[in-house]
Image (tube, rainbow, N blue to C red):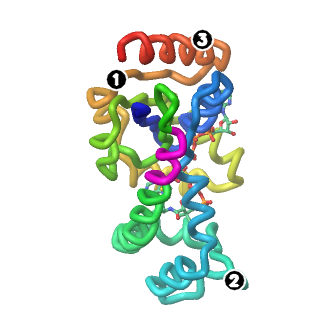
């Protein structure tokens, strides 16, 4: 059975970028954000999500993610309701995916909200990706074309790095990509050697 290695980090830390480095070394990666997006395109999920909002949050048949993003990170109750719809579906989807990849020594489960959802408890090891907050904010403003305030409001809905560090087995500081690639190779060897 493959070990489950959780990979997490706050918004803009670069956890997807780091996950892709593991993939390039042959490790299967599960990107929860991306899978959640596919799950949220299902008609039943679209209807369930729409039902928690007073206003229309759809564009045609699909969810208006930008609008939902602007609402939920300013409203904890709605964020919790949204999480309660999406997270159980992602959990089921991961179980199925994991089953297909069990021949590998380990798999990477990447999620922004690993600790927030207690998913670390179902992981054998956890890797945390960090970067200075101002770097993270600039990366996301550039990538998603969103405001400083929107990124800040998302950060305020995530756990602080200082609380995540003691709960993690490996911490990667993601600034220089070449250094991170070397670190990824070292971590792969370490995980395989120790387990
Ligand atoms: C609010 C939504 C529609 C915004 O979608 P959008 O395509 O604009 O952004 P994306 O999904 O890439 O999220 C951007 C970043 O926000 C952060 N984030 C996303 N969901 C959450 C959450 N539930 N709690 C805290 N931070 C979150 C992450 O750092 C994430 O990478 C979407 O994030 C969502 O539906 N979130 C709730 C479900 C969820 O938790 N999904 C992710 C893990 S399963
Ligand atoms: N070391 C780096 N140097 C320069 N740019 C980087 C680096 N790492 C990531 N980036 C860029 O920063 C942005 C955020 O990275 P990425 O999408 O991997 O972050 P994330 O932690 O997965 O974010 P989110 O929580 O929003 O999904 C991307 O545009 C990515 O190309």
CA gap between label 1 and label 3 equals 17 Å
For label 1, the SS is loop
Position above or below: 127 against 75: above
Quadrant where the N terminus is found in the figure: top left
Res 12 → quadrant: top right
Do the numbered discs 2 and 1 sit on residues whose CB atoms are within 8 Å? no
Q: Nearer the viewer, residue 73 or 16?
A: 16
Residue 184 belongs to the span the image colors magenta: no
Residue segment shown in magenta: 94-101
Across and down, in percent, residue 182 comes to 60, 11
For label 2, the SS is loop
Quadrant where the C terminus is found in the figure: top left
Position above or below: 184 against 141: above
- Lower sequence index among marks 1 and 3: 1
Residue beneath label 1, please? 169
* Label 2 neighbour load within 10 Å: few <14, some 14-19, many 20+: few
- Lower sequence index among marks 3 and 2: 2
Residue beneath label 3, please? 182
Residue beneath label 2, please? 61
Position above or below: 141 against 52: above
Res 75 → quadrant: bottom left
* Label 1 neighbour load within 10 Å: few <14, some 14-19, many 20+: few
Across and down, in percent, residue 62 comes to 67, 77
Residue 100 belongs to the span the image colors magenta: yes
């Amino acid at each position: 059975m493959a070990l489950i290695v959780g990979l997490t980090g706050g918004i803009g830390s670069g956890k997807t970028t780091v996950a892709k480095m593991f993939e390039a070394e042959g490790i299967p990666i599960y990107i929860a954000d991306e899978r959640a997006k596919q799950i949220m395109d299902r008609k039943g999920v679209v209807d369930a999500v729409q039902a928690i909002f007073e206003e229309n949050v759809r564009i045609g048949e699909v969810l208006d993610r930008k609008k939902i993003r602007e609402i939920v990170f300013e409203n904890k109750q709605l964020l919790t309701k949204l999480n309660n719809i999406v997270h159980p579906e992602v959990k089921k989807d991961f179980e199925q995916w994991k089953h297909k990849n069990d021949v590998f020594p380990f798999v990477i489960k990447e999620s922004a909200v690993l600790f927030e959802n207690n998913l670390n408890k179902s992981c054998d090891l956890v890797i945390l990706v960090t970067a200075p907050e101002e770097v993270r904010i600039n990366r996301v403003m550039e990538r998603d074309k969103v405001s400083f305030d929107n990124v800040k409001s998302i950060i305020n809905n995530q756990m602080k790095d200082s609380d995540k560090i003691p709960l993690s087995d490996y911490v990667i500081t993601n600034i220089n990509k070449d250094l991170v690639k070397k670190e990824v190779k070292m971590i792969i060897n370490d995980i395989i050697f120790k387990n």
